[in-house]
Amino acid sequence: MLDYWVRLHRRYRLPVTQVLVLLRPPAEERAIESEFRLEGTRHQYQVVRLWEQDPAIFLNDIALLPLASLAATEAPEQLLTQVAQAVSKIEASELRREVATCTQLLAGLRFKKSLIQQFFRGEFMKESVIYQEILQEGLEQGLERGRREGEFTLVLRLLTRRVGMVSPEAEAQIQALSLAQLEELGEALLDFSSVAELTAWLQSLQP
């Protein structure tokens, strides 16, 4: 959270309010933290535990409706019924389909697939080849972005250890690298001893 705050503030120079939304309770042995402390550094952020929130907040707002099934309740199936009814009342068919799809995906974190299908009857989920192709493409792109972001973070940390703080300009260049190039840099930086070597490596990529 501190890393994200620094990046956003560095780029936009505006106040940043951070909210971490937890969709379901973590494992019992894991504590939910709302701040980071290390030596003289203290960074705080808000934590919203969705399972403790009033479902009415989400049921009354179409944009938040997909989150309603994960809100606080003593009667989960009754809540899912209310969510399904709220979705069915959306007049615009395209918006109704989008909200229903998102609602079913998130509801899967709490309910069994058979129960979700019972309430929504699958009428909004497109099982066509085109839908499946788009879904698969989206999943692959998401995994690629996740791997790339992880590699970028790792490379940046290793560079800081090897050559010290990296300038914003060099960081921007590194962030623009492809996953394959980031992996190459991850190997090359092991031989770096100065920022100049990093700069030379980045310049070697330019046509």
Image (cartoon, helix red, strand yellow):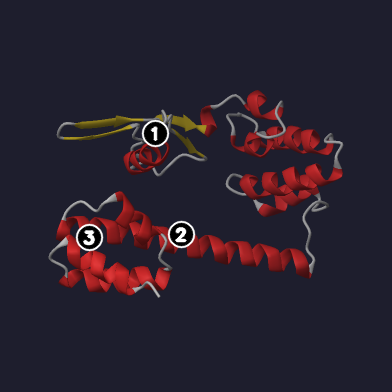
* Inter-mark Cα distance, 2 to 1: 26 Å
User: Which of 115 and 181 lies nearest the eye of the viewer?
Assistant: 181
Q: Which mark is residue 77?
A: none
| Residue at disc 3, secondary structure | helix
- The answer to whether one can see residue 119 in this image is yes
Give the quadrant of residue 91.
Answer: top right
Distance between mark 2 and mark 3 Cα atoms: 18 Å
Dot 2 or dot 3, earlier in sequence:
2
Residue bearing mark 1: 13
Picture layout, residue 187 above or below residue 102: below
Q: Residues within 10 Å of mark 2 (few under 14, many from 20)?
A: few
User: Image check: 123 left or right of 14?
Assistant: right
Residue drawn at (24%, 73%) of the image: 188
Looking at the image, residue 131 lies above or below residue 44: below
> Quick check: can you spot residue 111?
no
Badge 3 or badge 1: first in the primary sequence:
1
Residue annotated with mark 3: 158
- Where is residue 191 shown, x and y percent of the image? 16, 72
Residue drawn where x is 35% and y is 68% of the image: 182
Q: What amino acid type is highlighted by mark number 3? A: Leu
Q: Position of residue 111 (x, y in %)?
A: 63, 46
| In the rendered image, the vertical position of residue 207 relative to residue 122, given as above or below | below
Secondary structure type for disc 2: helix
The residue at which mark 2 appears reads as 146
Name the front one of labels 2 and 1.
1
